[in-house]
Image: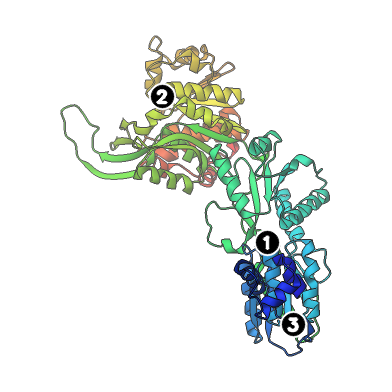
């Protein structure tokens, strides 16, 4: 920095600067004098410094001048660790995207006669200040300047390529890239994104490039049928998750996400995003060791920082929804079941005692969803819980069985539904219900989650929630070409508006009597229900099995002979397994027989959810008993 440079910055003559520096400023106003002195101090000006030859004495001092501090903490820690290991100290400055701050830092570094510099210029024009270091014979190395030969760089192109390839490995071909404006990292990762698409013969189109400041960018993503997003910045990924959540979209159910991640974000555990860590600390160690080798005039190896970039987890990646196995959706009640074992069922005017009790999540919605999940089939549940501890029990239980709970809403003004179940010695039971939040499940809740009906084979319905909600679910299922199964629990009449949308109708004997009291035999009742537009009627007959009729055949299927301990969950076990095996392509007859085995397993144990059979146990037993079914 010369006296001419100071005069230019202060907007005064060289003579004025000279007078101030030599204490001959009696005739110069105080404002001008203070302005000049401020600039002199900020830019570390020393009179006659240019006439002094550059010192060749080592200071064992490294200079680090970075543009931004957001990512640099781990990077500089790596440099400091390398420096201290070799007896060097570090002078660290941040330009903070300011050319003025950058120049001030340059003059300070030169004044302190550093042995070597690592520099991340603010812009390309910053390189015009290189002469300050060359005049002092200070070696310069650059960082994040891929167009310069002596620059150290993290391979963001490779990281972008790796992130994109992880999407391709999950069969994604409609992938968007989330770009940050004016970001070198983002531009380089985007280059890797495009290279990966090319290598996988996926055509790049301009609409694949998105930014957060685009209006309606999420709507455009889904309008263009993107199934995955690659993001160059973790902060943008978090904002994307937030915006998706506001619109009731979920990752990775609706769209997959992979992001680059600064290593400062070690402690962010929610939302869990599949990410590739940017190895700033390792990079800092690498650069620091190279700087020291330069200072000590040792042979320097390859300046290329080469490392493996690994996807840390797959929490936010799934195959596209259109390629997944068709799931089953359940719309129904969510309760906490309190089971009381009694000698005889309650009677009016009598007090009975219970010899044991158990508490578990239940309700027909939960029971059927768990039944499906235990048979290793994907399932979503739509329902309501209250604002209480019991709701937490429900969520924890659904998580344990890997049931999709996007459709479960917590109602802040209600309590979670409860069922009090009395079970006598022969397995027969009575149930008293406190509907709680179940009563609040509305047609709007179904419409809000209509997208859950996509890529679905069967929708399981029960009538322990409001009837208009069940009708809405049946309509939406039909509009998505989803078959429906209805269990008419506690239904006193069956409106045609509902029945015409039902594929399989499964009442028990008592329920069929209530809904069709005019006729007596199961076959006559089945004919009545078929006349309402239903395709298949299955009337369950307890220990006598079930009667099945459709337009082509009718048959009585015997029950599987198991000892009954608790019959509460028999119908739910039957329905969930029937839906699973029909979804897997089994015939109606075989599916009913398999479902009868599942029901038998359930009645042989206490409770419902704990008694529902898993697929391995069910199929192993059937193979040993009737191998022709599977």
Give the position of the N terminus as an image quadrant: bottom right
Nearer to me, 616 or 106:
106
Q: Say if mark 1 contacts mark 3, CB within 8 Å.
A: no
Q: Say if mark 2 contacts mark 1, CB within 8 Å.
A: no
Q: Secondary structure at mark 2?
A: loop
Q: Earlier in the sequence, mark 1 or mark 3?
A: 3
Where is residue 492? Give x, y as percent: 37, 17
- Left or right relative to 238: residue 347: left
**Marker disc for residue 98:** 1
Nearer to me, 266 or 102:
102
- Left or right relative to 542: residue 33: right
Mark 3 or 2, closer to the camera: 3
Relative to 341, residue 85 above or below: below
Residue under circle 2?
A: 466
Instruction: Name the residue: 38% across, 28% down.
Output: 439
Relative to 403, residue 350 above or below: above
Residue under circle 3?
A: 49
Where is residue 214? Give x, y as percent: 67, 40
Task: Report crowding for label 1: few under 14, some 14 to 19, many 20 or more residues within 10 A (C-alpha).
Answer: few
Where is residue 480? Give x, y as percent: 61, 26
């Amino acid at each position: 920095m010369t006296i001419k440079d100071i005069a230019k910055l202060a907007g005064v003559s060289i003579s004025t600067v000279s007078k101030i520096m030599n204490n001959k400023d009696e005739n110069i106003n105080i404002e001008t004098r203070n302005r000049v002195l401020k600039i002199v101090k900020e830019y570390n000006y020393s009179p006659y410094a240019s006439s002094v030859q550059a010192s060749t004495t080592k200071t064992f001092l490294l200079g680090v001048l970075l543009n931004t501090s957001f990512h640099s903490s781990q990077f500089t820690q790596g440099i400091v660790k390398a420096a201290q290991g070799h007896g060097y100290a570090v002078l660290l400055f941040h330009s903070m995207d300011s050319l003025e701050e950058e120049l001030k830092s340059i003059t300070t570094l030169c004044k302190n006669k550093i042995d070597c510099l690592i520099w991340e210029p603010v812009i390309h024009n910053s390189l015009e200040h290189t002469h300050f270091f060359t005049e002092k014979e200070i070696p310069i190395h650059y960082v994040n300047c891929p167009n310069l030969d002596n620059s150290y760089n993290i391979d963001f192109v490779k990281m972008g390529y790796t992130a994109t390839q992880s999407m391709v490995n999950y069969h994604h071909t409609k992938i968007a890239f989330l770009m940050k404006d004016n970001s070198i990292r983002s531009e380089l990762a985007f280059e890797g994104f495009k290279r990966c698409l090319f290598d996988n013969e996926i055509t790049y189109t301009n609409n694949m490039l998105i930014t957060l400041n685009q209006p309606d960018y999420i709507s455009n993503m889904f309008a263009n049928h993107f199934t995955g997003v690659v993001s160059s910045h973790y902060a943008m990924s978090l904002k994307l998750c937030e915006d998706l959540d506001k619109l009731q979209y979920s990752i990775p159910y609706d769209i997959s996400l992979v992001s680059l991640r600064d290593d400062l974000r070690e402690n962010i555990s929610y939302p869990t995003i599949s990410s590739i860590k940017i190895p700033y600390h390792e990079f800092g160690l690498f650069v620091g060791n190279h700087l020291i080798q330069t200072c000590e005039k040792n042979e320097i190896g390859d300046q290329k920082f080469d490392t493996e970039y690994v996807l840390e987890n797959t929490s936010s990646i799934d195959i596209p929804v259109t390629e997944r196995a068709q799931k089953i959706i359940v719309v129904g009640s969510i309760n906490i079941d309190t089971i009381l074992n009694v000698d005889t069922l309650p009677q009016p005017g009598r007090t009975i005692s219970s010899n044991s009790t158990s508490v578990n999540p239940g309700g027909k919605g939960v029971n059927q969803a768990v039944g499906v999940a235990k048979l290793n089939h994907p399932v979503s549940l739509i329902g309501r819980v209250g604002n209480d501890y019991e709701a937490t029990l429900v969520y924890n239980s659904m998580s344990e069985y890997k049931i999709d709970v996007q459709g479960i809403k917590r109602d802040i003004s209600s309590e979670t539904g409860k069922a009090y179940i009395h079970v006598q010695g022969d397995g027969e039971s009575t149930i008293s219900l406190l509907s709680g939040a179940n009563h609040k499940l509305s047609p709007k809740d179904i419409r809000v989650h209509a997208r859950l009906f996509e890529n679905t084979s069967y929708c399981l319905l029960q009538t322990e929630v409001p009837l208009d909600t069940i009708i809405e679910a049946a309509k939406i299922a039909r509009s998505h070409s989803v078959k429906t199964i209805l269990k008419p629990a506690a239904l006193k009449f069956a409106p045609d508006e509902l029945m015409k949308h039902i594929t399989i109708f499964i009442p028990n004997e008592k329920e069929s009597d209530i809904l069709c009291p005019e006729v007596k035999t199961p076959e006559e009742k089945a004919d009545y229900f078929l006349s309402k537009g239903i395709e298949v009627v299955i009337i369950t007959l307890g220990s006598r099995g079930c009667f099945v009729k459709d337009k082509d055949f009718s048959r009585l299927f015997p029950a599987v002979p198991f000892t009954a301990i608790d019959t509460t969950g028999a119908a739910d076990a039957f329905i969930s397994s029937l839906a699973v095996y029909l979804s897997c392509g089994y015939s109606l007859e075989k599916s009913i027989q398999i479902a009868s085995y599942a029901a038998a397993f359930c009645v042989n144990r206490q409770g419902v959810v704990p008694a529902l059979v898993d697929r391995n146990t069910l199929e192993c037993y059937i193979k040993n008993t009737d191998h022709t079914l599977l």
